Image (cartoon, grey):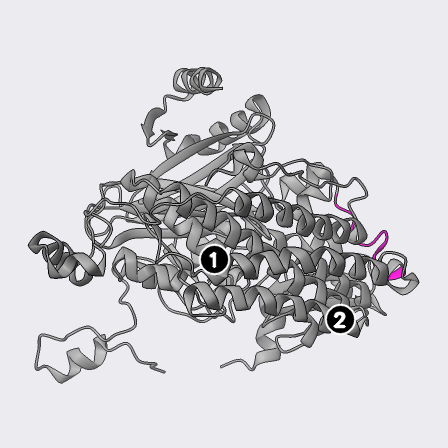
Amino acid sequence: MLDQSEFAFNELRHLVTDRAIEGETMLLNMGPQHPSTHGVLRLLLELDGEVVVNCFPDIGFLHTGIEKNMEAKSYEKAAVMTDRLDYLNNLGNNLVYCMAIEKLAELDVPIRAQAIRVILTELQRIASHLVWLGTHTLDLAAISMFWYTFRERELILDINEMVSGQRMMTTYFRPGGLWRDVPVEFEDAVRDFIRIFPKRITEYEAMLNENPIFLERTKGIGVIKPEDAIHWGVTGPMLRASGVDFDLRKVDPYMGYEQYEFDVPTHTDSDTYARYLVRVEEMRQSLRIVEQALDKLPYGPVRSNNRKYVPPPRSELGTSMEAVIHHFKLWTDGFEMPEGSVYAAAESPRGVLGVYLESDGSTKPHRVHWRTPSFDNLQMLPVLAKGHLVADLVALVGTTDFVLGDIDR
Amino acid sequence: MENELQNIVSVLVERFDVEPKEFRGQTSLIVSPEKIFEVCQSLRDEHGFTWLEVLTAVDYWPQQEPRFHVIYFLYSIDKSMRMGLRVPLPSVSPTLPTLVELFANANWRERELWDMFGIHFDGHPDLRRILMPHDWQGHPLRKDYPLGYEEVQFTFNAEEIDRDKPYAKE
């Protein structure tokens, strides 16, 4: 058995330059426990002094076999695992999974459920960007930002808890609608957030936009040309900061996004600072969507009436034999899906999050594949890092905004 | 837009002898393993499908021929169109040409398929395991790979049980 260092060198020998074999450059591990790698990511660096010559991300430390596990669970039970993928975008994961099931089963979603889904996923987008902003600036030595952004994120997590009983692992969206309707306090809580948050974004910008240290660390670092971004499959704010106007909410609207007015922020500088500007502007736009959706939130049911897929309400169980049968069938065996395969995609805070779902006609999925944005975005990191200093690599890791749970699945 | 997609499909059917299919509004083509590189190259360079959105596989074990389907989704950002490709592969030494030259992000995705399904990609620059540890045995997403638990042994032959038990051996 080889010891760990020997193995790492043999494994990567064909990737490093000859100078590393002669000992002219140094191979250095960053992670898997380094605080700036945002999770358990190991970066093997080939360094010439402090300049990065080569960078090899080693992933899989957080691999939990979610795709395999979902194959062994019924559709409704597998929904619980979707929360655990991208743990900063739980509701977004729920949404994509439900969209795939609804597409395959041709299941309707009531308009009230659609509007609530939009409100909650947009709030989740803001929460995710707040974590990104806090940790990214923390890596760049602006520690105070972290406390401010997490203060606001707490408001959103409180709303999550109010609707679903959980701050993070919500499983609130279910095939055909929502788990249950939002409580009466929901509207006031969201209105409070809409009132408070714009001022707070202005505060963040006042602290960072002209901050000489922040500008020095971000301007001109990690420039991605638009054609390179597409070639590498980069999506989300990273793609838009390279000047490509691509947002699934606009080009392929789902959940009624076409009714809401919002802009897709883009930037042409393509560097770390541009990505910062794009994400901050995205938070403003998300807030616009939330406000519009809340203003015209329709009344009505929040879950489809199709008893082949959706269990009957509790109140019917005492009076209807049919309801008891459906309840029993759906909570023991689960629902049977039509045979076939679909692909559903939505815009997550990090880019295009998609689910490929294949059914063989039984109550368990035959195959679920998650097309996760972080996986492709991280792939570009070595290209960006080449020629930069190690300190800039920390900025690049931050600006990529990946979640390891999203990469390793 | 629908028309444009139909035109592209008919061009490809004529040139590469692919089989078009439509399900729930998604057009996919069934492509033979020898032609997948040319079909992708044609889609990328002539029809503007510049972004490889999805690359994954499905295992149909115990069906042997074809056992796997490798699935590609290409997306055209200019025209907002998505094209699915399915490549059937046999059970014995499933192999495909690599697409790394056409789409850079195919690199990790093909490594993932090698890791999870044991599908080999010819010409791949760095085909190592990506998610599982480097010394892992087997390919976890195959249908004949057990999900964590030990398989029931229908025998009293101690040697046979020992041989089949999934624990570390030297």
Q: Residue at x 37, y 36 (%)?
A: B86
Q: Is the magenta stretch mostly helix, strand or loop?
A: loop
Residue A248 % position (x, y): 55, 39
Task: Decide which of tag 2 and tag 1 comes sooner along the chain.
Answer: 1
Chain for mark 2? A
Tags 2 and 1 touching, CB below 8 Å: no
Q: What stretch is highlighted in magenta?
A: A216-224
Crowding near the residue tagged with mark 1, few <14, some 14–19, many ≥20 C-alpha atoms within 10 Å: many
Q: Residue at x 21, y 81 (%)?
A: B162
Q: Is residue A182 magenta?
A: no
Instruction: Report the number of discs.
Output: 2
User: In what element is the residue under mark 1?
Assistant: helix
C-alpha distance separating marks 2 and 1: 26 Å
Front one among A157 and A1: A157
Residue indicated by mark 1: A91
Crowding near the residue tagged with mark 2, few <14, some 14–19, many ≥20 C-alpha atoms within 10 Å: some
Q: Which numbered dot is residue A138?
A: 2
Q: Is residue A17 visible?
A: no
Q: Is residue A88 left or right of residue A203?
A: left
Chain for mark 1? A
Outermost residue on the right side: it is A212
Front one among A337 and A25: A337
Front one among A322 and A142: A322
The image quadrant that residue B33 belongs to is top left
Residue A75 % position (x, y): 28, 55
Say what amino acid the circle numbered 1 marks: Leu
Q: Which residue is drawn at 75% across and 58% down?
A: A199
Q: Which numbered dot is residue A401?
A: none
Say what amino acid the circle numbered 2 marks: Leu
